[in-house]
Image (cartoon, helix red, strand yellow):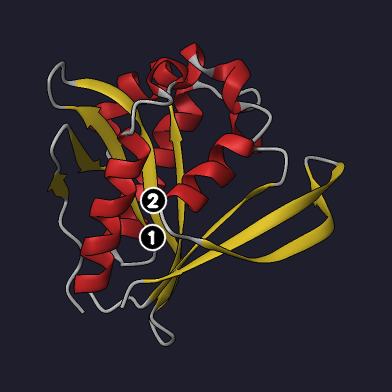
């Protein structure tokens, strides 16, 4: 199986393979959107630039070994870093994967995640993936609305799931790409 492209050009955005060379943009975006990201992304807590660098190095290794495809999202018009999207939890045998994403606070609600999601789904389908999943906290209505808006079906509610030492429900959405 061929690796996914290191760049995916869309209408208003470009998805660029995660790399250490973009670490300043990545870290700055997390700092700017920290309070909005923290409830949903536990890895954000206490994040440092050095930790971001290690993460980017790990993303590059996982991308190159086809274990996970992490992309940084840049706005084409301004060339601003606006978020991340990844194809993760890859199951090459069953042709399935999960999608994870986040945007900077100032870019939420502008359709960027829908654009990134639909383009990454097309690439995933072209690489043999049949099913994609989105998992989110039941309280994260913005993320669950993205899943619903993009044709994902709620297939499971994991009751009393543990997240960040807190009991919460987790929603699991599925979409068939074929």
Q: Which residue is mark 1?
A: 68
The answer to whether marks 1 and 2 mark residues whose Cβ atoms lie closer than 8 Å is: yes
Residue matched to label 2: 86
Asked if residue 61 lies left or right of residue 167, the reply is left
Give how far across and how far down residue 36 sits, in percent.
59, 21
* Residue 28 coordinates in the image, percent (x, y): 40, 15
Question: Of the numbered discs in the image, which one, if any, rests on residue 166?
Answer: none
Q: Nearer the viewer, residue 68 or 162?
A: 162
Determine whether 73 is above or below 50 in the image: below
* 92 relative to 105 in the view: left or right: left
> Which residue extends farthest bottom?
93
Q: Residue at x 63, y 61 (%)?
A: 172
| Element assignment for label 1 | loop
Q: How many numbered discs sit on the rendered protein?
A: 2
Residue occupying the point 19% across, 72% down: 126
**Where's residue 81, x and y in %?**
28, 23
Q: Is residue 129 visible?
A: yes
Q: Mark 1 or 2, which is nearer the eye?
A: 2
Please tell me which of labels 1 and 2 falls first in the chain. Answer: 1
Residue 109, relative to residue 142: is it above or below? above
Q: Is residue 52 above or below residue 105?
A: below
């Amino acid at each position: 199986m061929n690796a996914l492209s290191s760049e995916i050009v869309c209408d208003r955005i470009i998805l660029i393979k995660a790399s250490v060379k973009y670490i300043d943009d990545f870290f700055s975006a997390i700092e700017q959107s920290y309070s909005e990201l923290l409830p949903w992304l536990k890895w954000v807590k206490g994040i440092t630039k050095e930790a971001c660098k290690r993460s980017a190095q790990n993303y590059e290794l996982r991308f190159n070994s086809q274990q996970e495809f992490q992309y940084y999202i840049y706005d084409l018009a301004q060339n601003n870093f606006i978020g991340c999207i990844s194809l993760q939890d890859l199951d090459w045998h069953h042709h399935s994967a999960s999608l994870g994403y986040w945007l900077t606070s100032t870019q939420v609600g502008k359709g960027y995640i829908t654009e990134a999601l639909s383009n990454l789904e097309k690439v995933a389908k072209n690489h043999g993936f049949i099913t994609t999943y989105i998992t989110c906290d039941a309280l994260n209505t913005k993320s669950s609305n993205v899943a619903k808006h993009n044709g994902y079906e709620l297939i499971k509610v994991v009751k009393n799931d543990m997240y960040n030492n807190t009991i919460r429900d987790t929603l699991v959405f599925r979409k068939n790409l074929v």
